[in-house]
Image (cartoon, rainbow, N blue to C red):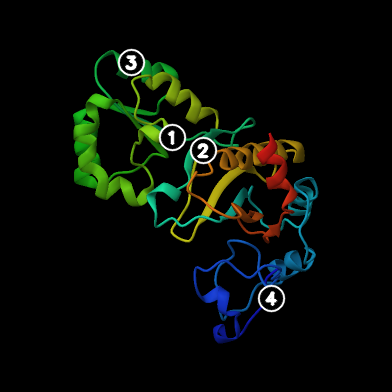
Amino acid sequence: MCGIIKDASQAPAWTQSTTPRPAGSNDCAVGDEEYMAKKVSKNIAKARAAVENRPYSLQDAVPLLQKVKFAKFDETVDLTLRLGVDPKHADQMVRGTVVLPHGLGKSKKVAVITTGDRQRDAEAAGADIVGGDELVEKIQKESWTDFDALIATPDMMKSVGRLGKVLGPRGLMPNPKTGTVTNDVAAAVKEIKAGKVEFRTDKTALVHVPVGKLSFPPEKLVDNALTVITSIMRAKPSAAKGKYVKGITLSSTMGPGISLDQSVADQAAKA
């Protein structure tokens, strides 16, 4: 649980850099924002106060997060993992995809760039937007990104490659490693619609992954979270040394971050 610090200079030194916090430090949950000099609302303060300053089991953290809810909309539940890797080195980058067993609680808007019969396959599979070079031109000229995921066939990647400046910063660039560059566009569309999510380390070695909506039954959120943690454990780079998972936090859009017990990662590693 983060305390309220009126002066950012009062924050512990580790919060002012990308260096992982010292072992045993309880100043802030993994992935929380840097301290800011602003007053938190009474609702947020009340929700934070309900979370004890200790790690929780995943089975206890989910109901607690639902209990302290105060927002009037159905919040997204997220997992944040701090990994013991150096993202500056390509051989320590952690990236992959996983299909959540209970989905995300919303249907993603999927665009497909392909030609010929595969356009019909994509439409039949449920793609929301399907096109070829004309769709590439629209994205390039208008910086148009009104979709949640983009799939492309290998033969179109020469054209799609020109869209890096538009798609890259938004995390929408098709990539073979995430299954979004493929000839089987129908299967790719169905997977994304079923709840396929991508995970990757950011420059501070954090991985943020949505695992569903706060309105989900607790057991479904637990299943989704365990599936994500297991996939990230399996994606451990061979070049990574020392402790791989340094901390895990469960949170919601407006809710507090709840630190999870290390045993969650240990169990996932054995799955």
Q: Is residue 151 visible?
A: yes
Q: What quarter of the picture does the N terminus occupy?
A: bottom right
Q: Secondary structure at mark 2?
A: strand
Q: Cβ–Cβ below 8 Å for labels 2 and 3?
A: no
Q: Mark 1: which amino acid?
A: Lys
**Disc on res. 3:** 4
Q: What quarter of the picture does the C terminus occupy?
A: top right
Q: What residue is rendered at 44% in x and 25% in y?
A: 189
Which residue position holds label 1?
A: 109
Q: Residues within 10 Å of mark 2 (few under 14, many from 20)?
A: many
Q: Mark 2: which amino acid?
A: Val
In the rendered image, residue 238, in percent from the top left (x then y), is placed at: 50, 44
> Which comes sooner in the sequence, label 3 or label 1?
1
Inter-mark Cα distance, 4 to 1: 39 Å
Indicate which label's residue lies in the foreground, 4 or 3: 4
Vertical side of 225 occupied by 115: above or below: above
> Which comes sooner in the sequence, label 4 or label 1?
4
Q: Cβ–Cβ below 8 Å for labels 3 and 1?
A: no
In the rendered image, residue 28, in percent from the top left (x then y), is placed at: 65, 69
Inter-mark Cα distance, 4 to 3: 55 Å
Inter-mark Cα distance, 1 to 2: 13 Å
Q: Secondary structure at mark 4?
A: loop
Q: Residues within 10 Å of mark 4 (few under 14, many from 20)?
A: few
**Disc on res. 120:** 3
Q: Cβ–Cβ below 8 Å for labels 1 and 2?
A: no
Q: Residues within 10 Å of mark 3 (few under 14, many from 20)?
A: some
Which residue position holds label 2?
A: 197
Q: Cβ–Cβ below 8 Å for labels 4 and 3?
A: no
